[in-house]
Image: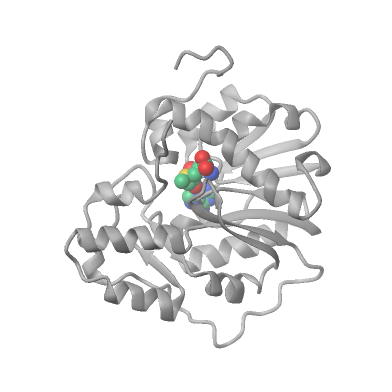
Amino acid sequence: MADTDVPELPGSDLRWRVAGHPDDVWFWKSGGVSIANIGTMLSIAGKSFTDYSRALEFGCGCGRMLLHLEDVGAKVELHGVDIDAEAIAWAQAHIPWVRCAVNDGLPPLAFPDAHFDLVFNQSVFTHLDEQYQDAWLAELRRIVKPGGDLVLSVSGEHPFSQLLQAHREAGADPGPLLEAYRTRGIVFVEDDGWKGGPFPDFYHSTFHAPWYVFEHWSRYFDIKAYVVRGSLDFQDYLLLRRPEGDLPPLPASAPPVPARAPGALRKLPRRLWRELKYRVRGR
Ligand SMILES: C[S@@+](CC[C@H](N)C(=O)[O-])C[C@H]1O[C@@H](n2cnc3c(N)ncnc32)[C@H](O)[C@@H]1O
């Protein structure tokens, strides 16, 4: 890429891990778009990045978005965490305006209660099953101050419709998948393109119905906004606010087991799974 304003970027393997493809132009430009997308979400709360004092990107990878926050980092204490030790090592060495750390697949994070007034991410809950999600929603609630904000993405109806289309193109019946999405509201596909890849066994592909997010995530946070395709024109973005008080106990009716995709889905080609991560748009 011949642009003198572009800083040193991570290598193709690290770019592939966060994007599903190694394109350097997409990696750089999409990071700027993602930061603008988060700015749009914060503006719904009448705020911008610099209205916060301490912010965390949860699941920052090698810093696709954090690379674009140098000016913000001069005013806001920025942190990034991820389970990917190589990605974090790169970010630590190349993004001096962010404090980076490796975390385990499940909580806790090494931060005190109410430490942050902003937590953001892109495409992390899109890879966790319901049990992991619940654990992390509770942990993010713990580390965010009452009144603090979160911007988190989910793979909603648009990525799900592309999954259905891919399913049809592969000659499979999308009926069971649709049924699971409609009735359960969350579909976690274990046997996807990430199987046998660089991430731990728990990392796969998750699709959320908006109604599920409103019903389930509102146990942890006040939902201030749900913007369809607000993230890279592909995933949906949520603006959440941490309420006062302790986390109320989950209702007894909460289903104890994670939703799984029907077995037929597992036959989709790996390429399709990677494409379902994001669509690479015209450059
Ligand atoms: C699709 S990538 C997105 C990375 C980054 N947010 C971006 O948009 O460029 C998903 C990231 O989530 C990270 N991740 C998955 N499970 C995690 C967990 N339990 N805690 C922290 N990070 C996690 C992965 O290592 C990976 O870097």
Q: Position of residue 31 (x, y in %)?
A: 55, 35
Q: Residue at x 47, y 58 (%)?
A: 155
Looking at the image, residue 75 sits to the left or right of residue 217; the answer is right
Q: Residue at x 59, y 16 (%)?
A: 5
Q: Position of residue 271 (x, y in %)?
A: 26, 46
Screen quadrant of the N terminus: top left
Looking at the image, residue 21 sits to the left or right of residue 85; the answer is left
Please identify the residue farthest to the front as the structure is shown: 282
Vertical order, 140 against 282 (above or below): below
Vertical order, 69 against 104 (above or below): above
Name the colour scheme.
Answer: one colour
Looking at the image, residue 136 sits to the left or right of residue 255; the answer is right
Q: Residue at x 34, y 47 (%)?
A: 275
Work out whether residue 113 can be spotted.
no
Work out whether residue 42 can be spotted.
yes
Q: Quadrant of residue 22?
A: top left
Q: Quadrant of residue 261?
A: bottom left
Q: Position of residue 253 (x, y in %)?
A: 55, 87
Screen quadrant of the C terminus: top left
Looking at the image, residue 34 sits to the left or right of residue 26; the answer is right
| Frontmost residue, 217 versus 136 | 217
| Frontmost residue, 73 versus 279 | 279
